[in-house]
């Protein structure tokens, strides 16, 4: 009991017996939320017990736990004798669901559970682990701007293959984590195949100018071996080469002759 005189709580051993000196006086007691004017606590407490029993009988029994996963507040049970509560002994992580989608089609994931969620302050966040089927949170990365309970990918590409995770949170407290493994199968769409073929043909394509026959530029030996191949231009070049060679031989002979006369 709170002692208004010195501002402290009193234990049962320190409380005065309300029957002492007040048998003829009226007492004010607060019982079960009501202020009751009674002549004796012997009358007030039985009345309060009846009211509490009536309220308890109106309480609904807690719902049964719904497997396989999740923190289910609606199934929480309060133990009055021990003054504590218990929840379902279920893991937070739900089993991985396999989703197979053909390449180019649509993939859809619904982040819903089979137990009742609180009506307010529920948030959803999505993560992705590419190319792996896992529940290890270290492999996942956040998906920006993905906040609803429904996720959709269209069109599906091989790079989308992997595990998607959805976390349901109530007041910053996780209630369940769902996992979806997306397996992308099938050949690419026909339009994409035709585009790839065209692209490969472009890579293999060579300019037509490179395929033109280059003019023949024979050497001097080839011209002498095939006189009929001489064109007027080639004949002029050959005559100029012969004249130049003759002039060179003449100059060398004159230099040698002068050297010989000077030495003798």
Image (spheres, rainbow, N blue to C red):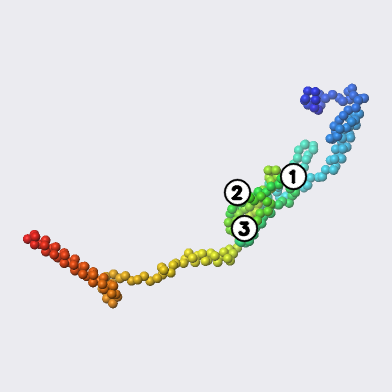
Q: In the rendered view, would you say 173 is above or below 22?
A: below
Residue drawn at (88%, 37%) of the image: 50
Q: Quadrant of residue 213?
A: bottom left
Judging by the rendered image, the residue that carries numbered circle 1 is 73
Q: Where is residue 168 in the image (x, y as percent from the top left)?
A: 69, 48
Seen in the image, is 260 located left or right of residue 97?
left
Q: Is residue 177 visible?
A: no
Seen in the image, is 114 located left or right of residue 129?
right
Helix, strand or loop at disc 2?
strand
Q: Where is residue 255 in the image (x, y as percent from the top left)?
A: 14, 63
Distance from Cα at disc 3 to Cα at disc 2: 19 Å
Residue drawn at (79%, 37%) of the image: 81
Quadrant where the image shows the C terminus: bottom left
Q: In the rendering, which numbered label is found on residue 183?
A: 3
Helix, strand or loop at disc 3?
strand
Which of the two discs, 1 and 3, labels the residue nearer the N terminus?
Answer: 1
Q: Position of residue 115 (x, y in %)?
A: 74, 49
Q: In the rendering, which numbered label is found on residue 51?
A: none
Q: In the rendered view, would you say 16 is above or below 254?
A: above
Q: Can residue 186 be seen in this view?
A: yes
Along the viewing direction, whichever of 13 and 37 lies nearer the viewer: 37
Judging by the rendered image, the residue that carries numbered circle 2 is 141
Helix, strand or loop at disc 1?
helix
């Amino acid at each position: 009991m709170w002692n208004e005189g010195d501002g402290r709580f009193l234990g049962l051993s320190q409380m005065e017996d309300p029957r002492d000196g007040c048998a003829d006086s009226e007492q004010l007691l607060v019982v079960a939320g009501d202020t009751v004017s009674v002549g004796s606590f012997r009358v007030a407490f039985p009345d309060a017990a009846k009211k509490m029993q009536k309220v308890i009988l109106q309480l609904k029994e807690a719902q049964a736990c719904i497997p396989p996963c999740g923190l289910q507040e609606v199934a929480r049970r309060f133990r009055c004798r021990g003054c504590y509560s218990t929840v379902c002994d279920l893991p937070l992580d739900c089993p991985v669901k396999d989703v197979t989608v053909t390449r180019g089609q649509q993939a859809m994931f619904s982040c819903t559970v089979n137990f009742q969620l609180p009506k307010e302050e529920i948030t959803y966040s999505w993560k992705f682990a590419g190319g792996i089927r896992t529940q290890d949170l270290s492999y996942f990365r956040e998906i920006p701007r993905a906040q609803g309970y429904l996720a959709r990918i269209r069109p599906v590409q091989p790079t989308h293959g992997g595990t998607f995770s959805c976390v349901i949170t109530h007041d910053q407290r996780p209630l369940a984590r769902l996992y979806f493994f997306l397996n992308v199968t099938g050949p690419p769409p026909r339009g994409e195949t035709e585009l790839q073929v065209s692209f490969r043909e472009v890579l293999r394509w060579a300019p037509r100018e490179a395929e033109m026959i280059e003019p023949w530029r024979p050497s001097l030996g080839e011209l002498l071996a095939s006189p009929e191949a001489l064109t007027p231009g080639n004949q002029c070049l050959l005559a100029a080469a012969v004249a130049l060679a003759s002039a060179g031989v003449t100059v060398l002979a004159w230099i040698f002759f002068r050297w010989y006369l000077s030495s003798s």
